[in-house]
Image: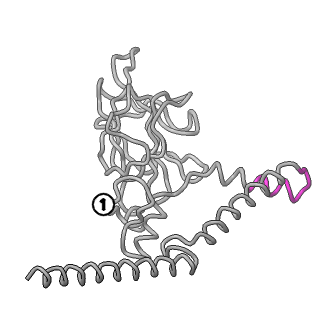
Amino acid sequence: MRNRADEIRKRHEARLKGTASVKKADRQAVLADGGHPLFKGHLFLMQVMGAVCLFLLAGILFKYEGAAAVKGQQYIKEAFRQEFQFAAVKNWYEDQFGKPLALLPGGLDEKPLNKEAASQKPYAIPAAGGKVFQSFKSNGEGLIISTGEGQEVETVSEGYVIFAGKKDKTGYTVVIQHENEEESWYGMLEKIDSSIKLYDYIEQGAVLGRVSQNREESTGKFYFALKKGEQFIDPSKVIRFD
């Protein structure tokens, strides 16, 4: 009986050794063929070299002052100044492939409206009972809205938070990028709500913060603007204030 058990154990060990040898041979074959199929070393190296070459070319371009060089410099500067259109790109990706783009930040489990629907949906009022205290013509960028003290300021439409912090002219400010490629700006806030994070996707009516106090009249006030591309537009033309 013991001899029979020893024979069975030896056969089992032989099979295990054979399986290990096959797996080792497979791994060697994969490495000989250029690496793991999910990581092609030569392709990765080419991508790194390409990125380095582009970086060096950009550096060389900024060393010259010819007409062609200046034109290229302006193109690069403009590319860095422009905001990446998270909402528009995500919408295009979903239309083409039917699922969220995992590389884009914030709230991707919630599918936003498509671009056409977003452009047709009217903007909501950012603060209840708000009245225009300073018109668009006064500064050419936005409105200063007068409200009750401690009034909450809400986003006029869904979109991505592309700025949340302090600006020189408007203090605590939140900028939302919408799918119709417009931006809404909310400034002069007493503070920004703790739930607002950079690159988060937020719904229409989300609370951004509270108005700052207008000490002269014991009321509240905040700054509101709409921007299309590089140009500010008059919010009074698309939102009706009291």
- Residue identifier under label 1: 109
Q: Nearer the viewer, residue 20 or 110?
A: 20
Q: Seen in the image, is 47 located left or right of residue 197?
A: right
**Is residue 19 depicted above or below 58 in this figure?**
below
Q: Residue furthest right?
A: 66
Q: Nearer the viewer, residue 14 or 156?
A: 14
Secondary structure beneath disc 1?
loop
73 part of magenta stretch = yes
Q: Look at 43% across and 48% down and name the residue there.
A: 199
The N terminus - image quarter:
bottom left
Residue at 56% x, 72% y: name it: 40
Foreground residue among 85 and 124: 85
> Where does residue 134 sit, x and y in percent of width and height?
48, 31
**Quarter of the picture holding the C terminus:** top left
Q: Position of residue 90 (x, y in %)?
A: 44, 64
Instruction: Return the residue nearer the eye: 11 or 109.
Output: 11
Q: Does any portion of residue 27 appear in the rendered image? A: yes
Image location of residue 111, percent across then percent down:
32, 63
User: Where does the magenta region start and end?
Assistant: 64-75
Q: Residue furthest left?
A: 1
Q: Position of residue 184 (x, y in %)?
A: 45, 46
Residue at 23% in and 81% down = 12
Q: How is the image coloured?
A: one colour
The kind of secondary structure the magenta stretch mainly shows is helix
- Is residue 224 among what the camera can see? no
Horizontal side, residue 50 vs residue 40: left or right: right
The residue at the point 82 percent across, 57 percent down is 71
Above or below, comparing residue 109 to residue 16 in the picture: above
Q: Quadrant of residue 118?
A: bottom left
Confirm whether the magenta stretch covers residue 79: no
